[in-house]
Every structure is written in C-alpha cells, then in structure tokens.
Image (spheres, rainbow, N blue to C red):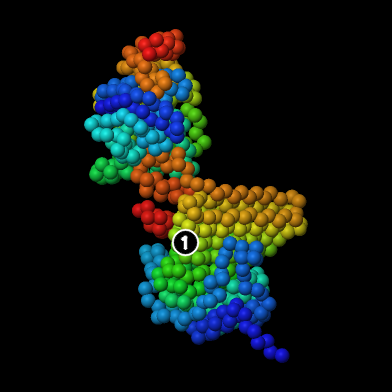
Amino acid sequence: MMETTVTPATALAERVAEAVNQAGSCSVLDARQSLGKAALESLEYPTTRNERWKYTRVAKLRDLRPASASSPSNIPPVLADFNAHRLTFVDGQFQGGEVVNESGVFIGPLSKASQLQDDRLKALDQDYFADNEWFAALQAAAPQDGACILIPDGQRTERPILVHHHLTAGDVVAQPQHVMVVGENAHAEVILWTTCDDQATGLMNGALTADVAKHGHLSLEIVQDEQGSSHHIAHQQFRQAESSRLTVRTATARAHWLRNDLHIHQGGQHGHSTFHGCYLPSGNTFVDHHTRIDHAEPDGHSDELYKGLAADTATAVFNGKIMVHKDAQRIEAYQRNANLLLGERSGVYSKPELEIYADDVRCSHGCTIGQFDAEALFYLRSRGMTETKARNLMVQAFLSEVLDGFRPEIQQHVEQVYAERLGWN
Amino acid sequence: MLKIVNLHARIGDTEILKGLTLELGAGKVHAIMGPNGSGKSTLASILAGRDEYEVTEGSITFEGVDLLELDATERAVAGIFLAFQYPVEIPGVSNINFLRTAINSIREQREEGPLSGKDFLAKVKACAQLVELDGKLRDRSVNEGFSGGEKKRNEIFQMAMLEPKLAILDETDSGLDIDALRIVSHGVNTMRDPNRSFLVITHYQRLLDHIVPDHVHVLAGGRIVHSGGKELALELEKKGYDWILDAQAEKA
C-alpha cells in the first residue's frame, strides 16, 4: 500500500529538495545524502515540545514556499581592504574567488573538490546531526556548494581564508556544505562570513564539517551579519584528534532569526578547544546558540564563553552541554554564559548542561542574566560622557572578553554594527 | 560661582534636604560637616545630577546657569566634578580609555577638537604623578580590584585630568590610611586655583588638617545650621555637634 498522507514537514522537505535541485545541488557522498533522506522519513519536525527546540519556534518555517533565486546583485563587500584568500558563494552556488589546487592543498568550492575524488572528503562520511536533527537531515539530503579547505600535513595557510556566503532577496533556500580538513601539524585560519539581502525572507540551512588531525590547528572566526528577515540554521561540527587545537569564535552581528548548533568532539588525548560567541538581538529578533562538546578522551581542555545582550523585545537562547565520557580523566572544561537585558520585554533563556562520567575532572559553569549597572552609567556620565557614549562603552566593555579574541578588523566591524543597531552612534 | 537657595529635596517619600542655602565663591574651599544622615551625600548627588532625587523647592545656580535644568553629562561639561564616596568598578573599560572617552566627549560638547594622543598622554603622566598612581593602575579596568585608597586616588587623578571649576569631594577621606590621605590632600591642594572651588564633604576633621578650608558649614536636618571659619572644624571635633543642634532647638 502506498502512503498517501503527506505531512506538512514532508511537503516542505520536498519543496526544498526541488528548489535545491533546480538551483543546483552539490552531491559529494551518496551515503550522507541517503542518511539525510532516511532521517527525514523518521524524524519529527521540531516543535517547542522538544527540549532542544523549546524556545526556538520553527512552525512558521514549515509554510515556506521556496522561490527560485533572483539574480545576485548587491552582494555586500566584506572587509574590503583586508588581505585574504577569498571565496564567495551566493545561495549555495560558487560565485568566484581564488581556487588553489597544488601539492595537496585545496582551497575552493566543494563542487570542484568532489570531482578530484579526494579521500579527505570522507570527513563527510560521519555526521553528528544528520540522523537526529530534522533541519540537518534536510541539508544532508540536498546539499549545495560551499567552501572546501584541505590543508595537508605540516602545511599552513599563508593568508586567512575568507569564505563569504550571501543569501539573496525573496524566499530563497540555500543549503551550503562547507568542509575543512586540517592535517597533522597543519594550521588553517578561516573566516566564515554570512550576509543576507535586506529583502531576504528565505532559509539559510548550512552545514560545516571540520576535522583537525593530530597536532593540527584550526582557527575559525564566524561572522553573521545578515540583513532582511530570513531564517538561518547552522549545523557546525568539529572533530579533533590527539593534541589538536580548535578555536571557534562566533559573532552574531545582525540576524533576524538565527540558530547555531555547534558540536565539538575531542576524539584524542590532549585536545584543546576554545569556543566563544557574542550576540545582541534587538527589535523582535531571535538568536539561539546550542553547543555541545564531547570530551571522549583524557587530558582535554575546553574553554567556552558566550556573552550577549537582548534589547527591545528580542530573545536570546543559550544551551551549552559538556559531556565528559567514562574514563576521560583529567579533563578541564570551563563554560560561562553572561547576558544583559536591555529591554523590559527582552528575554534570555540560558541553560548549562554538564554530564560527567569520569571522576578526576575539573569542570565549571556559570550563567548570569543581569541588567545595565545604573550606577556605572551615572559614573560615566558624571565624567562628561553622553548617555550614548556611556552605553556604547559599557556594551563594548561587556563584550570585550569575547570580541578581543577576534582579529581587530572583525572586532571593529562588529562593534560598529552593534552601535548602529542600538541607535547609539 | 555656586548659589543654592532654599533647596528642598526628597528620595521617594523621605524629605532629606529642607531648605538648604549655601553660596560658594570662586577659588574657595568650603567644607561641609555634619552628623550621619544629615543630607551631606544627598547634596553631593544632587549637585552632580543623580536623578533618583527629586528637588521639590528652591534653586541651584552655577555661574548664572540653572543647574537643575542640566543632566549629569551637561553638568560635567559645565565644569562640575564629583569625587564619589564609592567609586564604581567598570570591568572591561581601561582607565585610560575611559578618560580619553570622557575628555573627548566633553571637548566635543564644548565644540573643541579632540586632544591629540601626545598631549593626552603627557597629561596622564603629569596627573598620575600628582597622586602617585602607577602605570599598572592606569591601564587596568576602571577601579576593578583597586584598594580603597587606590580608588580615591583614582578619583583625584580623574579630577586633575578633567580640570573642573567646581570639585565636590564626597567623603573622600573615608577608608584612607594616613599615607593615602596625605597623597589625596596633596593632589587637591595642588589643584587649588583662584578659578576653582571645592566643596569638601567630610565626617572628620582630620582631612581638613591637610586640606585647609576657607569656610566650614554644619549641615544638620537638611539645612545649613551653622557656618564659620576653619577653626569651626576643630571646635566640632572637640565638642561634637550637639551644642549647635541644641542652640538651634532653642532658637526654634
């Protein structure tokens, strides 16, 4: 017997797959795609009854009718004077940039890398999210082009690689797949920058998979500076081998509705992970950071710090899970989430989750939600600062712990966007 | 320079100032003493523009301008400085960045150009020397982890940087050991100038051994009840406030 009822979620998946196929998909591994397709059949569409989606409403998204992409115009320049190795993508299609393919180094679009049958693309074989998260499955079932960065053993990127993805106007769907494989003793510096047209109303549902080999180092700065009123869900997964180092800094500069799902797996001893983030939703916008780190092997270190402010009627969500596996001894895992409420009707939901199955570990977590210190504001004003300058300085000060970690060009940009958005310039 | 006439103020339903009148001339140091709860710190807060207090009656004029029409920022721009009784810690803002922002914000509002980096640093150096504030404290976050004495020295350092016309010192001597008291007083005395007035609010006479006032006023029950020369401070130290309060009661 044929199944005749089509759920709204299945219908959405079909519409997205069709739109992606029309615009151009980028299939790398059939296995992953099949995994996504199978998962879509069994997984329920997320609702607020699901703990992981309790504060993250996606009901409206279900009615999305993807439109075909408009011709790319007005792609905003990113760090115009900054010397970087640039790759640009629009709506999940490679737009242009500097492609390198020599002596084992590949920097370019995944669509091109997949033609080379490079073994390192097997990194995509495993997927942390695709069989258990509906939107991740949706992306895996119909992936599009994204950046592919393969750095062989012992090599390092000469210039930072700046990957820019832009979403165009209208109900466009983009499902880019980014892959980064950093070899043993190799080092890559990457900036992943997303923008959206100010008339964008679609869905950006992208994935990033990164493997860092023994003694390798991946430093990733993510800047989300998105106009318009699109939805953005990001699935980011990182796997670390022994003695590798990972730094992921995420600055959500501007977003209408955004969810970052970040997962780090320390699969070797002496892994070192730093993941920091900052956010400042205002108006009626929404930002959600869900993170999880698995310390599967002993002697790992992790440092997690997320700081943000919620203004007006905006909502911010933070959920950070630290999982220390059995026998993963001598782990040091630190997590902190600090928030300030700027609006009387703004909201922050913060939830730390620690699961520890080893007995010799050092873990700590702290989460705070507070308000602007009125006394400090008065102190600054009594020294001659205008209210605007005083508030700006306090926001800057609050976020400096996170923003100081970015390169100065990015820090400056994000601070400026925040000041502009709060109307404090 | 500063003229306060019949000032009444309250916080919530509690009336704190009840008809305070006081006049300060340019270049003078006025001390205000008084028992706990007499309204000393309230007066300082109102002069600096803290908006928790509601002025219900009376006026404050500063150089002919109605001070009550100005907000905290505008008062600083007009040349009023309050050294806080409890300086605020602001993590993440370096002392230097804080001062640079403050000075340039004031200059901008006075329609002057920003101070050059070189001039600013030269000034920082000179003013820090004045209160023996070492380099580490200049670069650290504002007041964060400072000792009580360091915080008060930092207040005087800021005062020297901002060169106000009227400086209000709100119990600057509280929590100071004898060395810090000497340093702070030296800073203030160096700043004395025919065009600058000081309003020194204190509980104890000992600060006035170092910063010798031109006038001493007793604030009690929300009003100035007695005024005199510097010798009044000594008398208060010896005899307490009761004799003044009793005399007041008799008059009434």
- Which quadrant of the view contains residue A274? bottom right
- Which quadrant of the view contains residue A72? bottom left
Looking at the image, the residue that sits furthest to the front is B252
Instruction: Assign a secondary structure to mark 1.
Output: loop
Evaluate whether residue A236 shows in this view: yes
Q: In this view, does A158 lie above or below A29?
A: above
How many C-alpha atoms fall within 10 Å of the one at disc 1: few (<14), some, or many (≥20)? some
Q: Which residue is drawn at 61% across and 52% down?
A: A335
Residue A424: percent from left, percent from top: 37, 52
Give the side of residue B38 with respect to residue A334, left or right. Answer: left
Give the side of residue A282 with respect to residue A210, left or right. Answer: left
> Which of the pair B52/B237 is nearer the observer?
B52
Give the side of residue B56 with respect to residue A2, left or right. Answer: left
Q: Is residue B121 above or below residue A208?
A: above
> Which of the pair A242/B225 is nearer the observer?
B225
> Which of the pair A216/A380 is nearer the observer?
A380
Q: Quadrant of the N terminus of chain A?
A: bottom right
| Amino acid under disc 1 | Asn
Q: Residue at x 54, y 80 (%)?
A: A16
- Which quadrant of the view contains residue B204? top left
Residue A25: percent from left, percent from top: 53, 82
Q: Could you tell me which chain the residue with mark 1 belongs to?
A: A
Q: In this view, does A257 lie above or below A309?
A: below
Residue A154: percent from left, percent from top: 58, 66
Looking at the image, the residue that sits furthest to the bottom is A1
Q: How many labels does the image show?
A: 1
Looking at the image, the residue that sits furthest to the left is B64
Evaluate whether residue A166 shows in this view: no
Residue holding disc 1? A284
